[in-house]
């Protein structure tokens, strides 16, 4: 097996952007690791589920879920904003870790959809961002939780990834782009998170935008390059992850690749995940 990384557009920018946590968040007094494990109450995400039911078009046979941004009416936009208001009025630290995990994933995804709706039509989320030097909106403040302004990067890279230490998080948070793992058709809850993470991993690994082959060369999503450390930090750990979720044909190709001289290449398509 020979490793030959080929960079595609935006790769270096994304690697640098996602490598940093928000310094403002790091300086806050709030310890986001706190939880109340004795609290077994559940946060209500039915408003978010209603949006998903109406406007997320679920693909058949493990394809790409697409969002019908163009047809979201003003009433539903207000419902989404009301849901986000309700989520920001909650102190997630009062809940147990499982409930927190679902909360942060749903919040991230709902904020992203709301952002696209507020700026639609557009070709790619990368066209957004408050700074003229921005590659996308991920460092912009999006929500205020416990009095702290949080960006999407804060939620993903300073809360979800370091606190929960689960590489399958990458199959849950959605960046409104074609190559991103699917926006799930179900709102996350403490009772379904494990199932949704497993199905998200399986669907993405077995789709061409996740893992595929071109001759002897292994083609994989740039996600696995940007966040390689989350998947063990080595090519062999990445391959082990792929084999864990790969269906029979893909798994056989992965096993063969381990003994080959094939290259590893990465790519990512930032086109909006919209229904056309």
Image (spheres, rainbow, N blue to C red):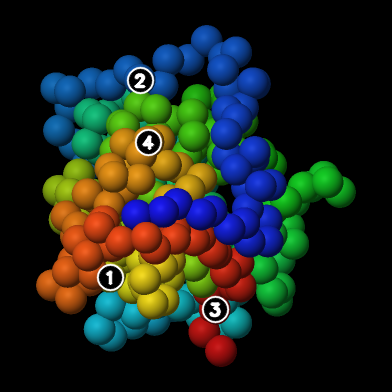
Give the number of the mark in front: 1 or 4.
4
Between the residue at mark 3 and the residue at mark 4, the CA separation in whole angstroms equals: 33 Å
Mark 1 and mark 4: Cα distance apart in space: 21 Å
Find the distance from the CA under tag 1 to the CA under tag 2: 33 Å
Residue located 60% across and 30% down the image = 20
**Which residue position holds label 3?**
274
Ranked by sequence position, the earlier of labels 1 and 2 is 2
Numbered disc in front, either 3 or 4: 4
First in sequence: mark 1 vs mark 3: 1
For label 2, the residue is: 33
Q: Could you give the CA–CA distance between mark 2 and mark 3, rounded to whole angstroms?
A: 35 Å
Q: Name the residue under label 4.
A: 233
Residue 249 makes an appearance in the image: yes
27 sits left or right of 227 in the view = right
Residue indicated by mark 1: 206
Tell me where residue 24 sits by quadrant.
Answer: top right
The residues bearing labels 1 and 3 have C-alpha atoms spaced at a distance of 21 Å
Q: Is residue 17 above or below residue 240?
A: above
Q: Is mark 1 on a helix, strand or loop?
A: loop
């Amino acid at each position: 097996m020979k490793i030959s990384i080929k960079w595609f557009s935006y790769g270096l920018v994304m690697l640098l952007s996602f490598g940093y946590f928000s310094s403002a968040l790091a300086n806050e007094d709030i310890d986001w690791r706190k939880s109340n494990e004795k609290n077994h109450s559940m946060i209500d995400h039915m408003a978010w589920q209603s949006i998903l039911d109406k406007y997320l078009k679920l693909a058949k046979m493990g394809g790409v879920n697409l969002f019908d941004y163009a047809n979201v009416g003003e009433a539903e936009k207000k419902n989404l904003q009301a849901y986000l208001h309700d989520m920001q009025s909650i102190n997630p630290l009062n809940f147990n870790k499982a409930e927190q995990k679902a909360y942060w994933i749903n919040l991230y995804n709902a904020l992203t959809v709301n952002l696209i709706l507020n700026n639609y039509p557009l070709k790619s989320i990368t066209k957004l961002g408050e700074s003229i030097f921005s590659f996308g909106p991920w460092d912009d403040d999006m929500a205020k939780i416990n009095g702290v302004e949080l960006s999407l990067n804060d939620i993903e890279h300073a809360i979800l990834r370091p606190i929960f230490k689960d590489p399958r998080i990458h199959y849950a948070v959605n960046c409104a782009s074609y190559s991103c793992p699917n926006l799930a058709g179900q709102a996350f809850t403490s009772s379904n998170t494990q199932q949704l993470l497993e199905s998200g991993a399986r669907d993405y690994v077995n789709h061409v935008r996740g893992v595929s082959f071109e001759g002897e060369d292994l083609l994989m999503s740039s996600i696995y390059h940007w966040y390689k450390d989350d998947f063990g930090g080595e090519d062999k750990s990445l391959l082990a992850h792929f084999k864990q979720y790969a269906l029979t044909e893909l798994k056989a190709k992965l096993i063969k690749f381990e003994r080959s001289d094939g290259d590893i290449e990465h790519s990512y398509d930032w086109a909006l995940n919209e229904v056309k």
